[in-house]
Amino acid sequence: MIMKSRLLKTVRQIGWYNGGWYALAMLIGTLSRGRWSLYKYRLVAQAVAREPLCRGRGGTIEVRALDALACAAAFSALQRRAEVIAARYRQGAQCLAAYRAGELLGFLWFTAGPYQEDEVRARFVPATQQACWDFDVQVFREHQLGLAFARLWDEANRLLHARGVRWSCSRISAFNAASLLAHRRIGARELGGAVFVRCGRWQWTAATLAPYLHLSRDPASFPQFRLEPPCSTSNR
């Protein structure tokens, strides 16, 4: 009953199409006892904003850039393995974290790219130097109705705009209703989508972007997606 209630709630939030994929992912995972997994991503881009989203609000939320040591300490209880965090920093990624009175509210990562994904085997490459890649954006559930998400993006936009970056590309789980809504609110535009099915060392990929179909049998084999942001240099 709990699983059925969770499924129906998610379907209402993400719609019947993505809800069907979500149900399939749950079914595959359950029948295979976790040996098989399915991921469905939406690939999007949002303009780097000049004007702050918070417009003077959220002053009690502090956003910090974390170095590798501080990040390892902060993420120790967040199901992010130490080797995953280390691999992100080796790729030149940066982590911004939002705090209020010492409490971690959420975080986001970004890199100039290309970025080697750590949830599935894939590489995402922004097609221009005016674009970057953001990933693992999360605000904890009890803070999702506040300004933590906007404060994180205000600081990220400030840093990126100063570096000449005008677009930030990312992948969002099609099953994450909160993330889909949050990105929609900041004007994210869809670039494509991809589905990954994994079982042991095997991975099957189907996408709306080249290479469209891919079969991976080991970690050295993965699809590479070149992401072209909208042909505009204007900011929102």
Image: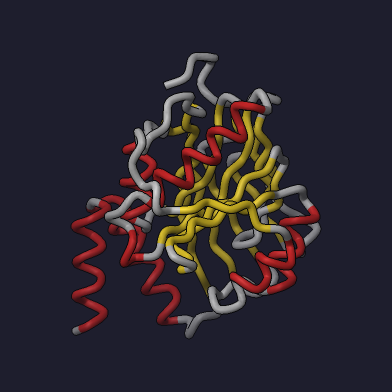
85 versus 135 height, above or below: below
Which residue is pictured at 39% across the width and 53% down the height? 60
Looking at the image, residue 167 sits to the left or right of residue 200; the answer is left
Q: Would you place residue 141 above or below residue 45 in this image?
A: below
Q: Is residue 116 left or right of residue 229?
A: right
Q: Position of residue 54 (x, y in %)?
A: 36, 38
Q: Residue at x 50, y 40 (%)?
A: 43
For the residue pair 28 and 70, the one nearer the viewer reads as 70
Q: Where residue 211 sits in the image (x, y, percent)?
A: 64, 38
The percent coordinates of residue 196 (x first, y second) are 54, 57
- Give the quarter of the figure containing the C terminus: top left
Pick the front one: 110 or 39: 110
In the rendered view, tell whether residue 116 sits above or below residue 35: above
Nearer to the camera, 201 or 155: 155
Residue drawn at (65%, 43%), measured in percent from left and top? 124
Viewer-side residue, 159 vs 82 = 159
Asked if residue 81 is positioned above or below residue 39 in the image, the reply reads: below
Residue at point 33% right, 42% down? 57
